[in-house]
Image: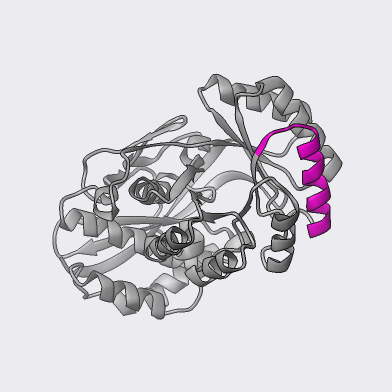
């Protein structure tokens, strides 16, 4: 099964409601789709969101990386030579992790099709379904409490609350949410780099004292501030998760070696795809550090790829794959089945994607 061409398309999917964090507000998913053609009938599908504020990757940069560098490196190669393809993919251009991730997952899709098995089974097959949390965007505390109660009514047992805009307001919001959902709902919080180290410690200690029962806090400080991240981890009892601080396996290794965080959030758009994410899983297994499988604001192709990895590996114990659920429509035919908090898999080979509605290939 040889690679003959790589085509790029674009999809636009409105969100059900605006997605608000400490660093941005988004109203629609605007993703780049890749289709890797082969000399057989098989097509591999991949996807990447241009999340410049986090990855630095814009729509134009992703397309250029694929057209000007990645195509030249891997067209003509045989999927059977998978390791060599991955080496060339990762060496042909530095950084550009979103472009690499889109190509990487399309290649893994073809790899599963080649061996006629769902990808999660080829990668480890640890489980065959997942339970995801759902994200509650930053808003007035009454709106966030109402949104949280609505999510519980839909069957969610875990809420991921966006914080990091203002410490005092964040605590009020969380109190309002905890009061309305009760004690039996898991609450995890994501500051999206919104606090300074000392501010984070003071805020999180107040949350502890208020009995808010926080499962963990995600990326409380700036991505580059590893010392600050460690300071927070060393001075609070709430577990700390590194997200934007971890792009590469080397980033993960450094954080684990100095215990700068208790947990690691793996996202394919940061790692450059499944190939490097698997390395992070192996490192985490050695250090005994549990991981979460997360996503950006993405439609179903890339989140399906992330779900297959999460289902394959036991070290991935927490799931934050609500991207497709936040979308108002689903243009992807096939893939994993997202039914609110429950994610299931078909027996289709690879990622199980068979087509895309409304794709713009201009």
Q: Position of residue 28 (x, y in %)?
A: 56, 44
Quadrant placement of the N terminus: bottom left
- Percent x, y of residue 153: 56, 19
Residue at the (70%, 20%) spot, across then down: 180
* Picture quarter with the C terminus: bottom left
Q: How is the image coloured?
A: one colour
- Is residue 203 rendered magenta in the image? yes
The residue that appears at 36% across and 45% down in the rendered structure is 311
Number of dots carrying numbers: 0
Tell me where residue 78 appears, x and y as whole percent.
19, 71
Q: Quadrant of residue 176?
A: top right
Of 356 and 181, the residue lying toward us: 181
User: Is 213 drawn above or below residue 232 in the view shown?
Assistant: above
Camera-side residue of 110 and 244: 244
Give the residue displayed 86% in from the left and 40% down from the top.
168
Q: Is residue 358 above or below residue 280?
A: above
- As drawn, which residue projects farthest toward the right? 168
Magenta span: predominant SS is: helix
Q: Quadrant of residue 223?
A: bottom right
Location of residue 113 in the rendering, given as x and y in whole percent from the top left corner: 19, 54
Viewed as shown, does residue 337 lie left or right of 263?
left
Mark yes or no: residue 196 visible: no
Q: Which residues are magenta?
A: 197-214
| Nearer-the-camera pick, 6 or 130 | 130
Decide whether residue 301 is among the magenta residues: no
| Residue 341 in sight in this render | yes
């Amino acid at each position: 099964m040889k690679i003959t061409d790589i085509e790029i398309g674009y999809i636009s999917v409105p969100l059900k409601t605006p997605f608000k964090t400490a660093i941005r507000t988004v109203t629609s998913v605007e993703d780049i789709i890749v289709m890797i053609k082969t000399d057989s009938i098989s097509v591999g599908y991949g996807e990447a969101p241009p999340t410049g504020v986090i990855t630095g990757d814009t729509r134009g940069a992703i397309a250029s990386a694929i057209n000007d560098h990645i195509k030249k490196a891997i067209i003509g190669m045989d999927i059977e030579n998978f390791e060599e393809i991955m080496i060339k993919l990762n060496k042909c251009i530095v950084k550009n992790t979103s472009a690499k991730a889109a190509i990487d997952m399309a290649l893994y899709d073809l790899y599963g099709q080649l061996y006629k098995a769902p990808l999660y089974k080829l990668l480890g097959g640890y489980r065959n379904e997942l339970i995801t949390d759902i994200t509650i965007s930053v808003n007035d505390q009454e709106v966030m409490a109402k949104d949280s109660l609505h999510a519980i009514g839909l069957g969610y047992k875990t809420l991921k609350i966006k914080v990091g805009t203002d410490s005092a307001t964040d605590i009020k919001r969380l109190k309002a949410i905890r009061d309305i959902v009760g004690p039996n709902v898991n609450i995890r919080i994501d500051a999206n780099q919104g606090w300074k180290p000392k501010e984070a410690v003071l805020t999180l200690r107040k949350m502890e004292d208020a009995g808010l029962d926080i499962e963990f806090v995600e990326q409380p400080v700036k991505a580059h501030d590893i010392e600050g991240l460690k300071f927070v981890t060393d001075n609070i009892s709430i577990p700390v998760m590194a997200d934007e601080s971890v792009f590469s396996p080397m980033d993960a290794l450094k954080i684990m070696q100095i215990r700068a965080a208790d947990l690691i959030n793996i996202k394919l758009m940061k790692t450059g795809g499944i190939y490097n994410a698997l390395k992070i899983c192996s490192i985490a297994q050695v250090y005994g550090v549990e991981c979460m499988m997360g996503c950006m604001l993405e439609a179903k192709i890339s989140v399906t790829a992330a779900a297959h990895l999460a289902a394959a590996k036991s070290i991935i114990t927490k799931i934050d794959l609500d991207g497709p659920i936040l979308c108002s429509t689903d243009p992807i035919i096939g893939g994993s089945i997202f039914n609110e908090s429950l994610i299931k898999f078909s027996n289709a080979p690879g990622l199980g994607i068979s087509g895309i509605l409304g794709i713009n290939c201009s």
